[in-house]
Image (cartoon, rainbow, N blue to C red):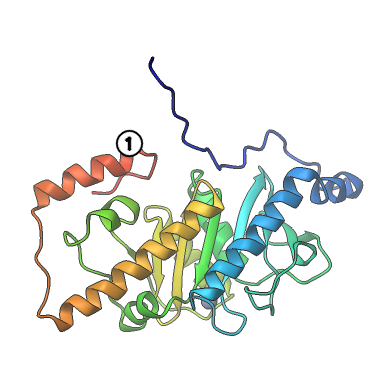
């Protein structure tokens, strides 16, 4: 007998443009079952991220696009390891807060600039994992053709020029690079990853940190054995077959 196996689809599929001028509708959506489930997932991912040392102090933030014109995001000035569902915020696509009692993170502007330019980006994860951030501080991206999984899940890391965190200029720079790269190193700052769902965006954060860490260790052993460009192209076609964006 032929068995059917399912791969879970974690993407939040919205079918509504919420009327932003109808506050009762916005608040009801903010407290709906689907959004409460996402809030809990973000808290869970926050704990995982914090436990892996990706979030120093109150560093890092998460966002999920939940309607054409609404994004659920984490608040400012909170440890990502100790968030509760009631801490989350709703913003419109310009970053104006429309629900939630805590103030939204100012870094959500960078998330929004990616989402506006790249419709496949439905969720973003920003963090400061030490080894990937070390590359970002050095203005470098990790090596290619050394790690098959990182070719599939990350591909070429994009490099966004330095700008003051939370500013419009920085957000636009991250959006410009994030349109064509699902992992962006923000020079002198940290890492941004995006995907169709928040868990996959977080996996990419784990993938790129592991890749940067092991690359540094390999350098201490004398360097990398690299596979061919031809072999890399096979990996890039796997990458596209599982729904990640095309990369040259
Ligand atoms: Zn940051």
Q: Judge: label 1 CB < 8 Å from ligand 1.
A: no
Against 153, residue 48 (above or below) is below
Question: Which residue occupies the foreground of this view, 72 or 18?
Answer: 72
The residue that disc 1 covers is 241
Question: Could you tell whether 126 is left or right of 39 in the image?
Answer: left
Q: Residue 142: where, in percent of width, then height? A: 26, 70
Where does the N terminus fall, quadrant-wise? top left
Q: Residue 186: where, in percent of width, then height? A: 42, 73
Q: Residue 80: where, in percent of width, then height? A: 63, 73
Question: Could you tell whether 230 is left or right of 133 in the image?
Answer: left
Against 6, residue 140 (above or below) is below
Q: Is residue 69 visible?
A: yes
Question: Which residue occupies the foreground of this view, 179 or 28?
Answer: 28
Question: Which residue occupies the foreground of this view, 192 or 48?
Answer: 48
Q: Is residue 92 visible?
A: no
How crowded pointer 1 is (Cα within 10 Å; few <14, some 14-19, many 20+) is rated as few
Residue occupying the point 30% across, 75% down: 213
Q: Number of marks in the image?
A: 1
SS at circle 1: helix
Specify the farthest residue to the right: 24
Q: Residue 72: where, in percent of width, then height? A: 69, 56
Question: Could you tell whether 239 is left or right of 226 in the image?
Answer: right
Question: Could you tell whether 183 is left or right of 45 in the image?
Answer: left
Specify the farthest residue to the front: 1
Residue occupying the point 58% across, 75% down: 167
């Amino acid at each position: 007998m032929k068995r059917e196996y399912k791969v879970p689809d974690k993407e939040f599929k919205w079918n509504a443009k919420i009327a932003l001028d109808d506050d009762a509708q916005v608040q009801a959506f903010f407290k709906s079952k689907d959004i409460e489930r996402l809030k809990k997932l973000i808290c869970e991912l926050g704990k995982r991220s914090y436990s892996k040392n990706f979030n120093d102090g109150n560093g890092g933030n998460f966002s999920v696009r939940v309607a054409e014109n609404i994004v659920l995001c984490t608040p400012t000035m909170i440890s990502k390891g100790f968030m509760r569902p009631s801490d989350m915020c709703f913003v419109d696509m310009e970053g104006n807060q429309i629900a939630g009692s805590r103030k939204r993170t100012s870094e959500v502007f960078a998330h929004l600039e990616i989402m506006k330019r790249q419709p496949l980006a439905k969720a973003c994860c920003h963090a400061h994992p030490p080894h990937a951030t070390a590359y970002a501080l050095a203005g470098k991206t990790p090596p290619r053709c050394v790690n098959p999984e990182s070719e599939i899940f990350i591909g070429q890391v994009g490099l966004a020029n330095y700008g003051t965190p939370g500013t419009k200029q920085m957000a636009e720079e991250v959006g410009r690079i994030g349109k064509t790269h699902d992992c962006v190193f923000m020079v002198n700052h940290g890492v941004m990853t995006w995907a169709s769902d928040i868990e996959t965006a977080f996996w990419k954060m784990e993938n790129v940190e592991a890749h940067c860490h092991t690359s540094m260790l390999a350098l201490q052993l004398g360097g990398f054995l690299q596979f061919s460009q031809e072999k890399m192209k096979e990996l890039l076609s796997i990458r596209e077959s599982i729904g990640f964006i095309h990369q040259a």
